[in-house]
Image (cartoon, rainbow, N blue to C red):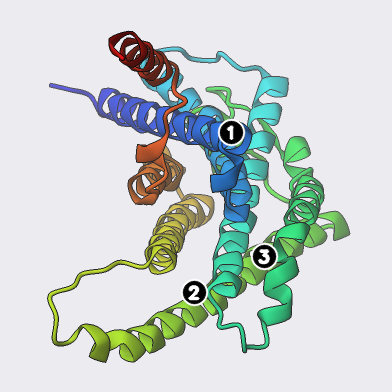
Amino acid sequence: MISSELIFGVAFFLQCAIGIVGNSLLLVLYVCIAFKKPQEKKPIDLILAHLTVANMATLFTRGIPEIMFCFGMRNVLNDLGCKVVFYIYRFSRGFSVCTTSLLSMFQAIIISPNNSVWARIKVKAHKYILHCFLFFCVTNALIYIRVIELSEAIKNDNISRYKYISHIFGVRPLNETKATAAFLFGMTLHDFIYHLLMALSSTHMVLLLYRHSKQVQHIYSNSNSTRSFPEIKATQTILLLVSCFVLFYWINNCCTLYVAYSVENKVEVETIGAFFGGCYPALSPLLLIGSDNRIGKLHFIPGKEKRHHKDFMNGLVNY
């Protein structure tokens, strides 16, 4: 009979393989577009490139340790290793929240009509993207620095002393101090603000799409045209990304809260939550690759570049 650990190990392995390959490919494509086809570069590419980096960091620091444990590699990380891995995981997860929120807000501003209140911001929005990322890095680094003190490697003889556990690391119970209160308040406020901004910007985009569909409905009502506007397609993709993020984020949170406040430490529930937490980093590059029509037009991949050069030289000889 196949054990649950083996099933989890295979599931995490497939998730990490798909996510790391997809995010790496997407990051390389954005870099190639920026340097070899700058005329096709979009301001939103910078946001998506940072999202791919956050996705890979999340998969490396959460998925890889689970794979190692499920395939029999126990006690690989010491206390210091667990603190570093858990801190990077929490930082990248918080950074992903901020980046997805920025992505939805940026797209909502971009598709706003030129006569709206967002017209002035639309022109200058791309100039402040790096400033936003600097702010995200500083705030997430400060908020989650507390986990370095609270996390440590799991020992078989002290599982009951942890408030929250996984296969790799445990988190000690929080002391009722001002630092602890500030830590909990910071995490709660951080997630609340960015999820609220995501909800507002997504609602704004949905209303704009509905209004646009009403305006152009009479144009195509008597024809068989299925024309797709690039801005509309990009907006629909981002709305789908935000929906997937919120769904998997809250499934992961519900599992984490259940483990943290249950009488018994049920590591299997936390593992299921960790798997759902890795679904967004693994699936988001597939959605982006499938919706970006620039990818099919790229001719600077090494294999293609050689083939096009060879065809060009053969054409010259035949001429």
Task: Report x, y in % for residue 190.
Answer: 69, 63
Q: Earlier in the sequence, mark 3 or mark 1?
A: 1
**C-alpha distance separating marks 2 and 1:** 28 Å
The single residue placed furthest to the top in the displayed view is 317
Please name the residue shown 40% across and 13% down the image.
306
Task: Report x, y in % for residue 197.
Answer: 61, 73
- Comparing 210 with 86, the one in front is 210
Residue type of the residue flagged with mark 3: Thr
| Horizontal side of residue 294 vs 92, given as left or right | left
Can residue 316 be spotted in the picture?
yes
Density class for disc 1 (Cα within 10 Å; few <14, some 14-19, many ≥20) is: some
Density class for disc 3 (Cα within 10 Å; few <14, some 14-19, many ≥20) is: few
Residue assigned mark 3: 188
User: Hey, which quadrant is residue 97 in on the image?
Assistant: bottom right
Residue type of the residue flagged with mark 1: Val
Up-down: is 312 above or below 172? above
Please name the residue shown 31% across and 15% down the image.
319
Q: Secondary structure at mark 2?
A: helix
Q: Earlier in the sequence, mark 2 or mark 3?
A: 3
Up-down: is 157 above or below 135? above
Residue assigned mark 2: 202
Can you tell which of label 3 and label 1 is closer to the viewer? 1
Can you tell which of label 2 and label 3 is closer to the viewer? 2
Density class for disc 2 (Cα within 10 Å; few <14, some 14-19, many ≥20) is: many
**C-alpha distance separating marks 2 and 3:** 21 Å
Can you tell which of label 2 and label 1 is closer to the viewer? 1
Residue type of the residue flagged with mark 2: Ser
Task: Report x, y in % for residue 228.
Answer: 30, 66
Q: Secondary structure at mark 3?
A: helix
- Comparing 141 with 204, the one in front is 204
Using the image, tell me which numbered label, if any, was put on residue 31: 1
Specify the quadrant that holds the N terminus: top left
